[in-house]
Amino acid sequence: MLPYLNIFGKEISTYMLCVLAGVFTAGIYVCRTAKKRGHDNNDYIVFMLISAIGVFLGGHILYGITNIPFIVEVVKNWTTLITSFLSFIKLFAIVFGGSVFYGGLLGGMAVGIIYGRKKKLDLKEYSDICAPMVPLFHFFGRIGCFLGGCCYGIESPFGITIHGNELVPMINDVQRFPVQLLEAGLNLALFFVLAHLLKKNRFKGSLFAIYLIIYSVIRFSDEFLRGDTYRGFLFGLSTSQIISILILIGAVIFLVVRSKKKLSDKQLYKTE
């Protein structure tokens, strides 16, 4: 693992470098694809920037929700823990300082839909073009997780042993399954599948729902290989597994309703 790179005497987070690489690569893909399909790049850049606000807020909010037990303890002992404005800021940073992918995904979707409807955009086309972008960006993000040491895997006879990681010391000297790399590879494969379907104009208006279904299965499964314990648990499932189930159900319902609507529209067209 390599949490930091020393560049010109300054330590730079490898996770942030991977995120920036993901933003840059995914942005180029969307702009080039939009241009090939006869759209204005600038419209998609604005759409992505607006959606990014939801990604940022949603990711941090859901991270805070996973810290509810800690929040409860803070509330119970607030008179001793919050003695100044500075101590409040530090506690706030602990509670909301991290980010959860699903929170960012849902936040970005919500803001994107609100903005798209307000501007009367063709959200079916926008969602199709942006569908491959998400796993492409996520691929770089998971590489960053591996380098930084977060989102680590369970102890395993097959895995990687890390030494001297000061950022996440609990991973040191324990052989762990590289679940971050597994999810990165699956996200990259998912990107190529969705990009191919988009290029062939298959499942028009439904590509994002297909992404949600496939990724929810991936995430539900690889959560069993996660070794970090701060993600919240309910009924024996992690927060992300519960969200995966809900997203899977919602995406399937969306596809069923959309298919029925298409079928009724075809029947109506034939009768006319």
Image (spheres, rainbow, N blue to C red):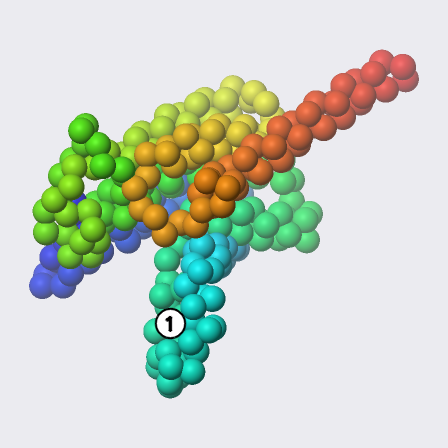
Image quadrant holding the N terminus, namely top left
- Extreme residue in the right direction: 272
Residue 154 drawn at (x, y percent): 27, 37
Q: Amino acid at mark 1?
A: Leu
Judged from this view, the residue extending furthest toward the top is 270
Which quadrant is the C terminus positioned in?
top right
Q: Nearer the viewer, residue 71 or 141?
A: 71
CA neighbours of label 1 inside 10 A, class few (<14), some (14 to 19), many (20+): some
Q: Quadrant of residue 67?
A: bottom left
Which residue is denoted by mark 1 in the rendering? Answer: 91
Which residue is nearer to you in this view: 139 or 73? 73
Image x and y of residue 255, in percent: 65, 27
Looking at the picture, tell me which residue is in the foreground, 63 or 51: 63
Q: Is residue 36 visible?
A: no
Q: Residue at x 68, y 25 (%)?
A: 256
Reply above or below: 47 against 8. Answer: above
